[in-house]
Image: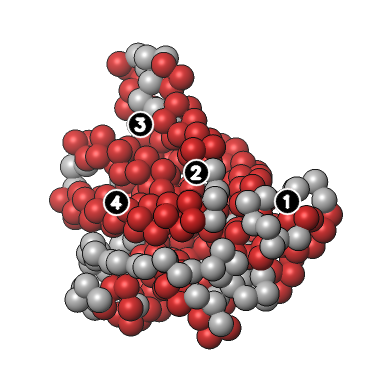
Amino acid sequence: MLSRHTRPATTADTELKPRQVKFDWSTAPFQWIPGDAFGSHAINHFSFTLVRGELFFCRVFNQALPHVKDAALRKDVEVFIRQEGIHSRAHRDSIDQYLTRYKVDLDSNYRREMWVFEQMLADQPFGIKIPKLLQKQWLTFRVGIVAAAEHYTCGFGQYVLDHCDWEARGANHEVSDLFTWHSAEEVEHRTVAYDLYRHLGGTYSMRALIMLVLAPTFLYLMAAGTAELANSDDEAPEYLKSIYKTAFWRAWLRSTALNNIMSPGWFMTKPINFMLPGYNPVNEGNTAQAQAYISRSPGVIANGLAR
């Protein structure tokens, strides 16, 4: 196995490219997966979270760029930033109007995301100025958080490509296309955040600590956010509106059995690979499968940028 010093700075197995896209959710139903309110709201919540999360990714990676000494990795990071910016805008442009139409309190949801990304993980967390000697370490730590999150989004993306043929099961085609296109690009650029983390000197112990905290946090946020969206849906059953009801978790398992969303257990076991000393994200997804979907995505084709 190559050491950190001899392993190539970039382990991407494809050339990355940004793609402009357009999705129209103006007629999409709140429960866009027929017969699965849980799956509909869980994936909508994941989308909503990404609007702020991916802007945070872009901000942190832009700060990291001056520290990137390898030309190939620098190019990957620059395209990653552009892809994530497009992802955030695509979700914002689609889901903000969509959720407003269904009377979801966007400000309340965004306050939670802003607290995480713009206060807790800010350049000056909670207004505390980081000493100059520790600023690169704080940057590397935040890049590590992105790498851990990208492990999840790649896993989510590969799950979608493998299992979630939503449109064939009657789901809204625009919503399905946005999520599947995004999933495919997450698989495609899955190596970049971890490569950058390593390039900045990120350690195994820091990586393991980040994931140990992130895994239960991510599971809680997925559950709580799903229940919150269900509370805005007059047609959702009452048991979906509280994570403290056993029927909520049974509904989650039913949605998993329908191949619409990963199980609660997946959120706790998926981190295991990330915490192995020999972890390499290139092994976590199928690039050819991802690009095959991108090449036929209506939202991509409409802009003439499929490959």
Kindly identify the amino acid type of the residue bearing the numbered disc 2.
Leu
Which residue is pictured at 46% across the width and 58% down the height? Answer: 98
Q: Residue at x 49, y 30 (%)?
A: 115
The quarter in which the C terminus is drawn is bottom left
* Mark in front: 3 vs 1: 1
Q: Can the viewer see residue 254 in this picture?
A: yes
Is the N terminus in the top left, top right, bottom left or bottom right quadrant?
bottom left
Asked whether the residues under the numbered discs 4 and 1 touch, taking CB atoms below 8 Å apart as contact, a structural biologist would say no
- Of callouts 2 and 3, the N-terminal one: 2
Query: Taking the image as drawn, is residue 10 in sight?
Result: no
**Do tag 3 and tag 4 residues touch (Cβ < 8 Å)?**
no
Q: Residues within 10 Å of mark 3 (few under 14, many from 20)?
A: many
Name the kind of residue labelled 1 in the image: Lys
Q: Would you identify the image quadrant in which residue 303 lies? A: bottom left
Tell me the number on the disc at residue 85. Answer: 4
The residue at which mark 3 appears reads as: 139
Q: Secondary structure at mark 1?
A: helix
- What amino acid is at disc 4? Gly
Q: Is residue 285 left or right of residue 303?
A: right
In the rendered image, which quarter is residue 302 located in?
A: bottom left
Q: CA distance from mark 4 to mark 1?
A: 32 Å
